[in-house]
Image: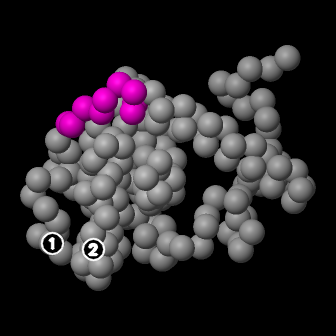
Amino acid sequence: MPIVQIAGNNPLTDGRQSPTALMIQRGMIRHLEHAGNAVLAEFPLANGRRADLLCLDRKGRFTLIEIKSSIEDYKVDHKWPEYAGFCDYFAFATWHGVPLEIFPQTEGLYVADAHFAELLREPVEQAMHSASRKALTLRFARLAAQRAERIARFAEANDLAFDRHAEGEATD
């Protein structure tokens, strides 16, 4: 039995994303995790903004992915340049229904569907300052732990199967 229900009380969604954005998100998460990254969606940043996806690679580098599900979504959102201090790499993610030429040539670009994603343009590295990296790493770890506990409580409250001692976790 899955630990997540597709319903209004799903602890993994906040209700602000369109079905298309969620589809892109699913494909991107699968792609990024397959590449060995830890990924958190809807990550609150210290500047009050929220990253659509923030992933941490095995070397401790952060990639921030901004999901754009339509031309209108891209045109009305001008906050993405404010993400520069919160990642080593920045990229847009979209789907085949959005013309790729609207995205800046200077930024990374993925095209995704619900199952996977393809990297079309490599993001350029802009290494974070060490103090910013430490603060973001701690924030990433704390948020991941809080979300895992929230999912466990949700599963227990809804009598869903959830193994707190899954592979890779320490047991007593």
Q: Quadrant of residue 82?
A: bottom left
Q: Residue at coordinates 70% horizontally, 25% vertically from top-left?
A: 169
- Callouts 1 and 2 close, C-beta under 8 Å: yes
Image quadrant in which you'd find residue 126: top left
Any mark on residue 102, and which?
1
Identify the element where label 1 is drawn.
helix
Q: Magenta part of the protein: which range? A: 125-133
Q: Amino acid at mark 2?
A: Tyr
- Point out residue 113 in the picture as x, y percentages from the top left corner: 37, 64
Instruction: Give the Cα distance between marks 1 and 2.
Output: 8 Å
Q: Which disc is residue 35 wearing? A: none
Q: Which mark is residue 74?
A: 2
Residue 59 position, x and y percent, is 37, 23
Callout 1 amino acid: Ile
For image coordinates 80% across by 20% down, the residue present is 171
Q: Position of residue 155 (x, y in %)?
A: 81, 53
Outermost bottom residue: 72
**Colouring rule applied to residues:** one colour
